[in-house]
Amino acid sequence: MVMAVYGYARVSTDRQANEGESLDVQRRTIEGYAMMNGLALDAMFIERGVSGSKPLGERPEGAKLLAALGPGDVVITAKLDRMFRSSLNALDVLAKLKARGVSLHMIDLGGDVTGNGISKLVFTILSAVAEAERDRIRERIAVVKEDQKGRGRYLGGKVPYGVRVSDTGALEAVPEQQAVIAEVRRLSAGGAPLRSIAAEIERQHGQKLALATLSKIAKGDQSNTLS
């Protein structure tokens, strides 16, 4: 049993919102679809000048829509890209709506994508596209990280001993710590045990270093120095 029927429309720019043409087209499309399917619109949630890059739940009207929905409700939108930023985002929200007993009608995809015969096909297509999106995201992140690493940028995590993060995000040497690293390696090369090295570093430089840190430095772990 249908409890409430909501429409959702969105435009990305203030100019589109002010002119209203795109919103009017979406509104008429939604109203016409509802009429043809015997549905009476209870309310329209209209997003003006909001980028599609924002997830539905982070948009002002989108958040209100999601908060208003209950079991048996119906949501109608003209196009997938008016409501979702990507297939990955769409797949996630669709699964949550189905679990809540809410029907979503995307007119450009043929209507009800949560409860009728095209639902399985739509979910299969969205799943395939979403996986491709995940792959592209992973590839972009890998490329960015490789570029940042090549330029000596800090990639996150614990900052290694001997360096610090500069104001520009690059790793730069800490002279006093680099001197300690050189001394640790000199003592280690001479056969001194780690505990003796630790005592000598504390005596000479006033720094107490963990044996695990000293071991990494002594072994020439490059994460402790700038390449």
Image (cartoon, helix red, strand yellow):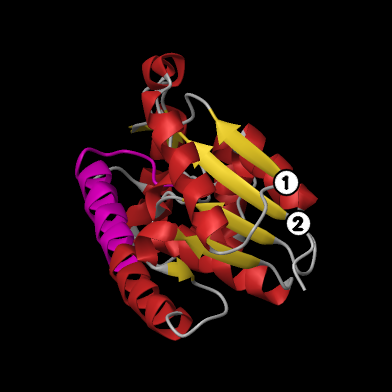
Q: Which residue is mark 2?
A: 4
Residue 167: x percent and y percent? 42, 21
Q: Which residue is mark 1?
A: 42
Magenta-drawn stretch contains 149:
yes
The quadrant in which residue 63 appears is top right
- Residue type, numbered disc 1: Asp
- Choose the circle earlier in sequence order: 1 or 2: 2
Looking at the image, which residue is at 43% across and 52% down?
Answer: 184
Task: Work out which quarter of the rendered image holds the N terminus and state it.
Answer: bottom right
Q: Badges 1 and 2: C-beta atoms under 8 Å apart?
A: yes
Toward the viewer: 65 or 144?
65
Q: CA distance from mark 1 to mark 2?
A: 6 Å
Toward the viewer: 46 or 124?
46
Residue 53: x percent and y percent? 43, 40
Q: Is residue 72 left or right of residue 215?
A: right
Question: Which secondary structure, mark 1?
Answer: loop
Q: Which residues are magenta?
A: 134-156
**Can residue 188 be seen in this snapshot?**
no
- Residue type, numbered disc 2: Ala
Looking at the image, which residue is at 46% across and 85% down?
Answer: 117
Looking at the image, which residue is at 76% across and 56% down?
Answer: 4
Residue 103: x percent and y percent? 63, 68
Q: Residues within 10 Å of mark 1 (few under 14, many from 20)?
A: few
**Can residue 132 be seen in this snapshot?**
yes
